[in-house]
Amino acid sequence: MSILDAIKQFEMMPDHYKGLSMKEMERRVAAIKEKFGSRLFIPGHHYQKDEVIQFADQTGDSLQLAQMAEKNKDAEYIVFCGVHFMAETADMLTGTDQTVILPDMRAGCSMADMADMQQTNRAWEKLQHIFGDTIIPLTYVNSTAEIKAFVGKHGGATVTSSNAKKVLEWAFTQKKRILFLPDQHLGRNTAYELGIPLEDMAVWDPIQDQLENEAEHNDIKVILWKGHCSVHEKFTVKNINDLRERDSDIRIIVHPECSHEVVMQSDDSGSTKYIIDTVSRAQPGSKWAIGTEMNLVQRLIQEYPDKQIESLNPDMCPCLTMNRIDLPHLLWSLEQIEKGEPAGVIKVPKVIQDDALLALNRMLSIT
């Protein structure tokens, strides 16, 4: 089932929840959490709003949260405060007696939506015709369960922003070339870090159904899907130049979903966890400009008042799809569970789940 089909079947939150006061919503959420106890588990992604994160039992990135859900055998209900592909992964990793719920089915991911199965099947057929059986597919965990299943079926693995280098190294022991979905920037930055020159990379345009490159096909080692994160693409080289002109002492750290030019001109780059750990360990009085989602940056500013922390892009806004999960939707979701009528249940069909788990488990065995 596509995300659009799932949304059509999804019961929408009644409007009256939007008129409730924050205090009333917080009181009701806290009461339900206390009532259900260990039967309820609320994982919250780092990019969520504070109004939601305050009720999260654990916080982390997408794969961390899914693995936390997998380890939690007591919870009957897992209310995943993230986006659709994250809840899918949690569903695949948890037991059949556990129910994974997304408080708002409209909470998707623009990057994950940039690679669908029709596009991927067409691309694979054409790339096989061009390159023969020399390609192994990899996909960022920020992808749909269907794309993970495609990758698993064809011998590939998933990657995260923290283990992408290890997985790419493994992939090159399997085949001569890699097809990297759906984020071109993470793929490009990781391959470059492994010593692959930019001229040995090509971009596959799923809209035009063709490669965007001028190199000889025989030289291509990495085929990058033309997808990106709508948040991280908004950090620019101009942001870096403006900041350095204003304050030459500030250190710039960005997520590898940023463009290659931005990553190259920054002082450091790494996964969300890496960014958090780096800032937390930094000396008091140190200065940091961070190129990642604004809710996380604001949270770091609050948690480390002894350091000067700001967003690399002063005009940045939070991830709009992630922020569809707000306190009214969380409350409504929990009250639907309390009524015995859970809404927004995420269920990945077994035929997709089996192949997708192949890709996930390959990654875990590698790293």
Image (cartoon, grey):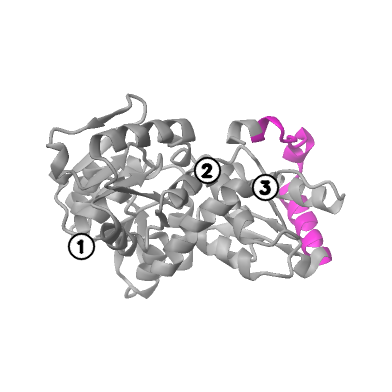
Circle nearer the viewer, 2 or 1: 2
Residue sitting at 71 percent across and 43 percent down? 344
Horizontal placement of 330 versus 37: left or right? left
Residue name at image x 22 percent, y 39 percent: 202
CA gap, disc 2 to disc 1?
45 Å
Q: Which label was assigned to residue 249? A: 1
Mark 3 — residue?
Answer: 347
Read off the magenta span.
6-35
Are the residues flagged by discs 2 and 1 in contact, CB closer than 8 Å? no
> 86 or 123, which is in the foreground?
123
- Residue plotted at (22% across, 60% down): 267
Residue topped by disc 2: 146
Q: Nearer the viewer, mark 3 or mark 1?
A: 3
Disc 1 element = loop
In the image: residue 36, left or right of residue 311: right
The one nearer the camera, 307 or 140, is: 140
**Callout 3, which amino acid?**
Lys
In this picture, is 134 found above or below 2? below
Q: Is residue 48 in sight in this rendering? A: no
Question: Which residue is found at the position 57% from the left and 46% from the top?
Answer: 352
Q: Is residue 182 above or below residue 360?
A: above
Residue at the top extreme of this rendering: 208
